[in-house]
Amino acid sequence: MPHPQDAAALPRPTEAELTVRLRAAGCVFAEDEARLLAGSGAAADALAGMVDQRIAGIPLEHILGWVDFCGLRLAVGPGVFVPRQRSAFLVECAAGLTAPGATVLDLCCGCGALGVALAHRVADLRLHASDISGAAVDLARRNLAALDVGLYTGDLFDPLPVALRGRIEMLLCNTPYVPTARVASLPPEAREHEPLISLDGGWDGLELQRRVARRAPEWLAPGGHVLFEVGEDQEQDCLRLLRDAGLRASSRSRGDIGATVVIGTAEG
Ligand SMILES: C[S@@+](CC[C@H](N)C(=O)[O-])C[C@H]1O[C@@H](n2cnc3c(N)ncnc32)[C@H](O)[C@@H]1O
């Protein structure tokens, strides 16, 4: 039976040693990950456990408990989608279209990354956020704690207060958009450790966007916008589904980070 003090006496691996272990396990960004793990402040035995988890394929952000998104440190955790860096482009597009004091809904909010990042760029937003996952909404509550936010749990617009109808000036909407048949080829990190409901966008990846677009005209304020993130190969279909829903449609891309944002705008 090891003495409890034995664990505390374990030598703390150096960043260089962690890099070697992570690289050998196939981590593409071994150096960056080693720096973050070493900088976590965990004691030697806890750090060893974190490295084992990483080598077993658990997303780094779930192990650390946070992700850096748009320069903000946001809480993330098991069972909830980890915001992707490319989604910063959606925030950038939204910031250019949102006036101070606007009413904003972060629909399918996950941990609340898009809403909180936009609130750091545009002053005095009236922010609302919603997701079907209770675990996601709990994390969003933590990340949005410093802001006065309406938080709701349920399917798309269903849990929202009726008073929001026709008043949303900016609808941020990063729904799942991976076509069902492609989910199996996602990296195991995503496939095995993020909920299917946060990844699977239906047969063509656009089922959620289609449902949102159909109801958006009823919830958007005159001249209000809905912003979707999609894959490059989904851009034209997404533009079409917004037009079919009676919205003006346009799109923007940033090839260097593989980000495509499709924008629907209500008449107004
Ligand atoms: C791709 S993740 C994006 C999360 C967050 N917007 C972000 O960018 O980090 C999609 C999110 O949609 C939520 N979701 C899936 N189906 C939903 C539905 N029918 N109604 C509301 N939220 C849904 C999932 O729980 C997940 O949090």
Image: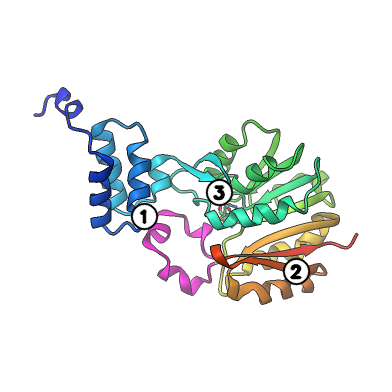
Q: Distance from label 1 to label 2 (Cα)?
A: 35 Å
Any atom of ligand 1 within 8 Å of the CB at mark 3? yes
The boundaries of the magenta stretch are: 178-200
Judge left or right: residue 228 versus residue 70: right
Q: Amino acid at mark 3?
A: Ser
Residue 68 versus residue 182: which sits nearer the camera? Answer: 68
The numbered mark, 1 or 2, whose residue comes first in the sequence reads 1
Q: Is residue 69 magenta?
A: no
Residue ID at (28%, 53%): 56
- Marks 1 and 3: CB-CB under 8 Å? no
Judge left or right: residue 6 versus residue 21: left
Residue ID at (59%, 76%): 233
Which disc, if any, is residue 250?
A: 2
Residue 79 versus residue 119: which sits nearer the camera? Answer: 119
Q: Nearer the viewer, mark 1 or mark 3?
A: 1
Q: Crowdedness of circle 3 by 10 Å Cα count: few (<14), some, many (20+)?
A: many
Q: Distance from label 1 to label 3 (Cα)?
A: 30 Å
Task: Quadrant for residue 257, please give it.
Answer: bottom right
Judge left or right: residue 113 versus residue 13: right
Q: Crowdedness of circle 2 by 10 Å Cα count: few (<14), some, many (20+)?
A: some
Q: Secondary structure at mark 3?
A: loop
Residue 93 versus residue 75: which sits nearer the camera? Answer: 93
Q: Amino acid at mark 1?
A: Phe
Q: Position of residue 142 (x, y in %)?
A: 56, 35
Which disc, if any, is residue 29?
A: 1
Which disc, if any, is residue 61?
A: none
Residue to which mark 3 is pinned? 133
- Marks 1 and 2: CB-CB under 8 Å? no
